[in-house]
Image: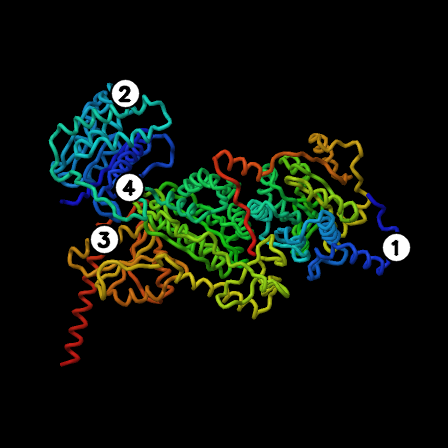
Amino acid sequence: MGNISTKPVYLEDKLAEIKSDGKLEYRSKALPTWCPGCGYFSISEGVTSALNNLAIKPKDTVVVSGIGCSSRFPFFVNTYGFHTLHGRTLPVATGVKTANDDLTVIAVGGDGDGFAIGGGHLSHVARRNVNITYILFDNGIYGLTKGQTSPTSSLGFTTSTTPYENHDRPLNPLMMMLSFGSSWVGQGYAGDPGHLGEMIEQAIAHRGFSYLHILSPCVTFDKTDKTYGNLNMQVKPIPDDHDSSDLMAAIAMAQNVHKPPLGLYYKEDRPTLADGLDEITQQSGGGKNVVTAKAAE
Amino acid sequence: MKNTDIQISICGSAGDGTIAAGDILKRALAKGGFKVIAFDVYPPEIRGFGKCISRVRVTTEQVYSLKHHSDVLVSLDDSHAIPHVGEVRDSGAVIYEDTPISGVLEGSHISAHISPGQIPYGLPVREISEKETSGNRSRNIVALGYLAGLIGMEPEIFHETIADKFRGKAIKITDMNVAAFDKGYALGQKTFKLDDVTVGKAKKSRNKDATITMMNGNAAVVQGCMDAHIKTFFGYPITPATTIMEKLATEMPKVGGRLLQTEDEISAIAATIGAGYAGSRCATATSGPGLALMAEMLGLGVVAELPSVIFVSQRGGPSTGLPTKTEQSDLNLAVYGRGGDGQIIVLAPTNVEGCYKCAGKAFEMAEQYQTPVIVLLDLYLSNRFETVELPKQSPFTKTSNKAAKKKDLEGGYKRYAFTKDLASPRALPGQENGMHTITGLEHNELGRPSDQPRMHEDMSAKRHNKLLAALSHHDITIEKRFGDEGDVDVGILGWGSNFGECLEAMFKAREEGIRCSAMKVVMLSPLPLGPINDFMDASGEVFVPELNYEGQFANLIQGATARSVHSYTRVPGSPMRVEDMLVEIRRLAKIKKAKKIGKTKKAKKKAA
């Protein structure tokens, strides 16, 4: 983790740095619709610099999203993008990747999109090890519909649909994704963009299904719980001696919801969905895989 | 030479080998060059003691439906077969077990139910089976052999078909079953013959460019998919569509295609649309309950203008309904079942060959008009076997995607550009300079969200009007008229699997001197309104029979043409009875006549 906001930043220097670096190519001309101070700005910054560092071309990248504040993401990056339905990010992304192995597919969405309405798809995309990256923006609230409780809202949290406090125990997304068989699981924080960028880069580089959980404050509808102020005091780096191939250690670490550790929880190399499908092609006596959809000349 | 037209029903309990015997029978006859149409009825349980019936109609010339009366009934289980004795015609045959293992109560044996006009053929089925195969598991084959001998079919083709059926098992199994068949055959040959229940010679086809084969609707869909070079398939098992996915799971990998069984139907259609977005020729298959789950995603397919093909085999509904019985009650869901103005293309083939054609053409249409396309079958069509002639060369394109060219991508690519044919050039992920984001939100030509009133008007018009071109899509029957030309007393307007019965009813009505014709409508959305209106103009009375309670097709037609029709609906879970339709046609023909007389009286009065 870097040192949070101590050095002054001068606009001229920053502009020169951005222009020279090449990541602007990954930015779309559309202005983000997020509120000033929203954690999602650091996520879009992280994704664009990660793609730039990994030298994945915009034309070979597809960003798939669902519905919600975070799902507006594809409009703000200059790649191929598909803003789909509430909760259906992962199956659509599975279809895109299955049709064309050459594409880098990044699924993005919020806690409501992924863990409420889309919850049924999580376990299956994880166990199949679809070679995509899932970046989950967790702010613990429904922002686009103006502040209702979400599956990751804390106990006692007051929202417009829980005016007498939330009594539903929040989910533990990291523990779920670890137990579902994700082959890469990590956690980042929007308040630490430097570290977040590194995590996004690692997640995209992983061959297999990578799940990156990002704690990201909603500055408009959550003034009391998951705020920058609170999270700055709570988050801590994963201890150096954590063995990222130890699933049980990762699950144990995921229990620490009050002092969320940031970094790589778990990583495993195993065959992807496409590997399995190619194996089936061979078993059937079929020829070379001809499935990759070709773009027109 | 007299033309052959025999219908055989085999009836037994689940596990008796009823369906297997019917299967061998129809395959052997098709091999012998006859035209076959066959349909099985079975219970939703795998074993249990439910009733199974296999009906096979064998003819020299292709027919369109099963007959109401069978010529021969074979009973493998009297308790199930007794209620079906009545379906055997006068002078028809009933074959049954005449040496029960123990005494049976009065009335529990089928012989007590055979009417005087029917001809009983009893034989010791179990005894022969035990002697030949040291067990009673070949009772179905013994009965089959007897039947073959009785009506004078060649035994060799049956031997081959039995060997095919047991291929992969020990040779001994085939040998024992062939012996069981021969024993039955010998007995059948020796007994006295029905002079009008015999098979003649089969005709040989002369079409060199086609392969003659016997298959059911689902197998034809699979063949259509394979000939159309399907690349990806995502599905979730549901009766009666499952066999489409099962067959594709075997066939697709052989040519490098990919098939995935998803966690539910929502995921299946989502992945199908995702694959379509990436440029892959893709499909899914389901039934009514699954289609209900897919409704929201199909709306996304409409607004994002992406190709996808959905094979829907209807069954009795609503909800879990009658999972193993046929019905045509998902027309509304297929035609209207989206939020918002979500028109798509819906094709409803009327026979097995149509299943093949519609399956392949659905891919072309989905890509060319950038829309979801539903191919609407039902259990009767999915499971009905027919002899079909399939082209040796695939009649389908490999891709019909309208690709974005260099000039389309210069100066800001417009994914939803208003073009002359309304289907905008499509850049696929991976294509240089084509980056864009698509969305379920209403959008402008660039694909960016827009809620401007004018934009929503224009985009709605684009999405609807582009589909009209499908009405003149190359090389597919959109609608077709049969029977009498010119003005008729009764015009039958039919759709889907039920159209075979419509044709049979129409031919019978004409034999009775009623001027009658029938039109099938294959494309249910958008509707071919011109030809439908012409047909209604020519028909004194318009008769719309269908297998649902509400008259969904009749309502569709009445709404679209603002003209009334005679809706005739039945929901027995089985094909419609031709005899019942005829009663209605005769009644309508009388109305027409009465109107005519009324008109001439009026005209005379006027003249006076």
Marks 4 and 2: CB-CB under 8 Å?
no
Q: What amino acid is labelled 3 in the image?
A: Ala
Crowdedness of circle 3 by 10 Å Cα count: few (<14), some, many (20+)? many
- Identify the residue under disc 1: A8
Image depth: mark 3 or mark 2 in front: 2
Q: Secondary structure at mark 1?
A: loop
Image depth: mark 4 or mark 3 in front: 4
Q: Position of residue B544 (x, y in %)?
A: 30, 57
- Identify the residue under disc 4: B38
Q: Does the image show residue B443?
A: no
Q: What amino acid is labelled 4 in the image?
A: Ala
Q: How many marks?
A: 4
Crowdedness of circle 4 by 10 Å Cα count: few (<14), some, many (20+)? many
Q: CA distance from mark 3 to mark 1?
A: 88 Å
Which residue is rendered at x = 49% and y = 45% of the image?
B233
Q: Position of residue B485 (x, y in %)?
A: 23, 63
Which residue is rendered at x = 56% and y = 36% of the image?
A276
Q: What amino acid is labelled 1 in the image?
A: Pro
Crowdedness of circle 2 by 10 Å Cα count: few (<14), some, many (20+)? some
